[in-house]
Amino acid sequence: MSVQGRQIQPSLILAARAALLASVALGWATLLPSVAHADPPQFGVEVGVGAALGLSPYLRNEVVAQPLPTSGTDERPWIIPSLAHIETGRSVAASLKLVASNLTAGASLQVFDLPSFTTYYRGDRALPPTRQRADGSVDDSGTEYAPLSPPINESIPSRLQDSLIVVGLGGDYRIYWPDEAIDFFIPIGAEIVLTHVTRPAASNRLGLAMSTGVGAVLDINSRIGLVFDARLHALATSHYGRRSDSARRAAAIGESTEAAFFSTLLYASANIGLQFTIR
């Protein structure tokens, strides 16, 4: 696999779009005629959709195996292992929440694509095909790694791409600044999350996530509001791969073995939804 690397510009584009969305909402609110202001609902339901962009890799120090040429057509090739970070791409999102005054509680879903990887280390020897396990991972014990300078960025063909699924269950505390036509708020959120990568025999990982950002509720009428928010999220789970593999690789490249116990992800999101006041 060989491709162009993923640059940082997409995160700047997302930030610009979030800023544009906020400015459009604010400009719309100033142009609207005065409407009856409604306080945050004592009880209501909020549904939303959105998009997100990964700002860090969740899958780190993964072995990317490049096959060596073989002399026979029926022989399984030996492989040269390299260590790479799988880049976290864009996501589609959905959420369903119950709202009670300043508190919300509910569920969320994120589905990230994993479009590319960045290789930082190259192994010193080829490994036999028996080192590749049934779940696709590689037993690289005994391999010495040398750093690549510069690192190599490569894309993954769409037919071979996996997805990272993040399911969350939690809630927010919202600090509101009410106005006549639009209520601004700062959400402080926490969730229990479950992550899954769409690979054969892949496991699930349980962890925690935190988020904060800015948001607004534009009153359509006394019962329905249009909700916008833009957030920065951070999550941590137990390490997604085999812990023994991760600890060995961290030691081989001079990293702290503490990183072998956790997989982390930073991402930014922008969401829009409807808030229905029941009472």
Image: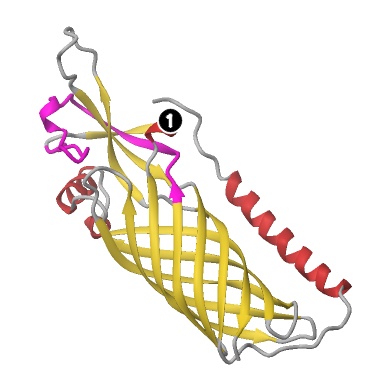
At a point 64% along the width and 56% down the height, the residue shown is: 15
Rendering coords of residue 18 (x, y %)? 66, 60
Q: Is residue 228 left or right of residue 52?
A: right
Residue name at image x 78 percent, y 63 percent: 24
Identity of the residue furthest to the top in this view: 71
Compare residues 206 and 200 and report the one nearer the observer: 200
Q: Position of residue 21 (x, y in %)?
A: 72, 61
Q: How many marks?
A: 1
Tell whether position 116 is magenta.
yes
Which residue matches tag 1?
157
- Position of the N terminus, as image quadrant, is top left
Q: Quick check: can you spot residue 156?
A: no
Is residue 105 visible in the rendered image? The answer is: yes
Q: Which residues are magenta?
A: 112-141
Residue 277, image x, y percentages: 62, 84
Q: Is residue 11 above or below residue 28?
A: above
* Kind of residue at badge 1: Pro
Vertical placement of 227 versus 129: above or below?
Answer: below
Q: Give SS at disc 1.
A: loop
Magenta highlight on residue 252? no
**Relative image position of residue 246 (x, y in whole percent):** 21, 49
Q: Quadrant of residue 85?
A: top left
Q: Is residue 272 above or below residue 139?
A: below
Q: Is residue 63 toward the left or the right of residue 182 in the image? A: left
